[in-house]
Image: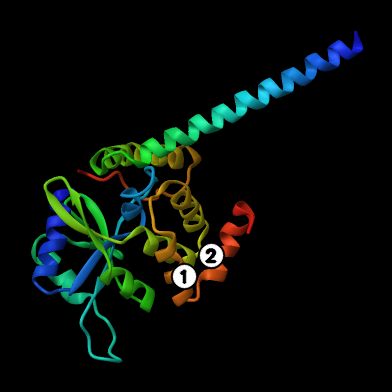
């Protein structure tokens, strides 16, 4: 019984390791896809990032790092 | 954003600087995933007499005549804060001279090459630069040979390896 339990635990660890590796691989693929977007699309995303960064700075009471580009 | 780039191209055509290239976070945007940046850095080459101090006054005066007023070190041009940075060492001079034309909308603009951007980030070495440098190594398409050549010629190989060594097992 103990041996069977040990085997079950090893399978679980291996299963979780495979899932984790797949998650990291998928995340890497997503980042590579973002890197290959057209520049105009990346600028649109940049504007969103600027808004988020400013909101985060405001909520922390930190100095504003700049302003959202008016384009 | 095209309007901003058109102003910069016009400034180059009117010889306020002999060459320009988009640098910093905006240049990185051409090669890696979007990263937050709040200004548009433009490296410029200015003709000057040897030993004389570089003045950006002609640039600011030209921009002011067109209604673009300086705010500190930046000038807001068509809604984007632009920082003009005269090339301050051989690496930057070379990087601007070797810059490539990239399309943006209906126009073309000069942008630093990825290898030069990596070298500049290695040279500057701020935490923000190190972070972006790692993104470049993981995501950008670049020439390892060209990068190696630039790092060696500008004595940056050791510094670069110290940033990347622990992660790449060097």
Judging depth in this view, the residue of B38 and B10 nearest the camera is B10
Residue B92 seen anywhere in this rendered image of the structure: yes
Judge from the rendering whether residue B114 lies leftward or rightward of residue A10; answer left or right. left
The image position of residue B27, as x and y in percent, is 31, 55
Instruction: Work out whether residue B89 can be spotted.
Output: no
Residue B160 numbered tag: 2
Q: Tag on residue B96?
A: none
Percent across and percent down for residue B113 are: 32, 60
Q: Chain of mark 2?
A: B
Q: On the same chain: label 2 and label 1?
A: yes
Check the image and name the residue furthest to the top: A1
Parent chain of label 1:
B
Q: Give the camera-side residue of A62 and B82.
A: B82
Quarter of the C terminus of chain B within the rendering: bottom right
Identify the residue at image location x=20%, y=82%.
B47
Question: Could you say where residue A57 lies in the image, as x and y percent from the top left?
Answer: 45, 42
Mark 2, other Cα within 10 Å: few <14 / some 14–19 / many ≥20: many
In the picture, measured across the screen, residue B148 lies left or right of residue B15, that is right
Residue most toward the right? A2
> Percent from the top left, x then y, of residue B166?
64, 55
- Which mark sits nearer the N-terminus, 2 or 1? 1
Observer-nearest of A23 and A71: A23
Q: Residue at x 26, y 55 (%)?
A: B81
Picture quadrant of residue B150: bottom left
Residue at image mark 1? B151
How far is disc 2 from disc 1 in space, using C-alphas?
A: 8 Å
Q: Residue at x 91, y 12 (%)?
A: A2
Query: Decide: marks 2, 1 in contact (CB < 8 A)?
Result: yes
């Amino acid at each position: 019984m103990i041996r069977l339990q040990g085997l079950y635990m090893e399978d679980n660890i291996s299963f979780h390791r495979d899932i984790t590796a797949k998650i990291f691989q998928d995340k890497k693929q997503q980042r590579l896809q973002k890197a290959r977007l057209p520049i105009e699309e990346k600028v649109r995303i940049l504007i969103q990032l600027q808004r988020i960064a400013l909101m985060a700075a405001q909520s922390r009471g930190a100095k504003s790092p700049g302003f959202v580009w008016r384009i | 954003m095209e309007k901003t780039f058109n102003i910069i191209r016009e400034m180059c055509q009117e010889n306020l600087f002999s060459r320009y290239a988009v640098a910093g976070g905006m240049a990185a945007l051409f090669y890696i995933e979007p990263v937050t940046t709040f200004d548009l850095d433009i490296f410029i080459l200015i003709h000057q007499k040897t030993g004389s101090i570089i003045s950006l006054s002609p640039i600011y005066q030209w921009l002011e005549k067109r209604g673009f007023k300086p705010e500190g070190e930046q000038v807001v041009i068509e809604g984007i804060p632009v920082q003009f940075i005269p090339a301050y060492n051989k690496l930057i001079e070379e990087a601007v001279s070797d810059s490539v034309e990239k399309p943006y909308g209906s126009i073309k603009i000069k942008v630093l090459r990825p290898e030069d951007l990596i070298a500049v980030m290695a040279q500057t070495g701020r935490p923000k630069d190190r972070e972006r440098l790692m993104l470049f190594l993981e995501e950008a398409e670049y020439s390892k040979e060209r990068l190696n050549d630039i790092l060696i010629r500008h004595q940056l190989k050791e510094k670069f390896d110290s940033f990347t060594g622990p992660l790449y097992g060097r």
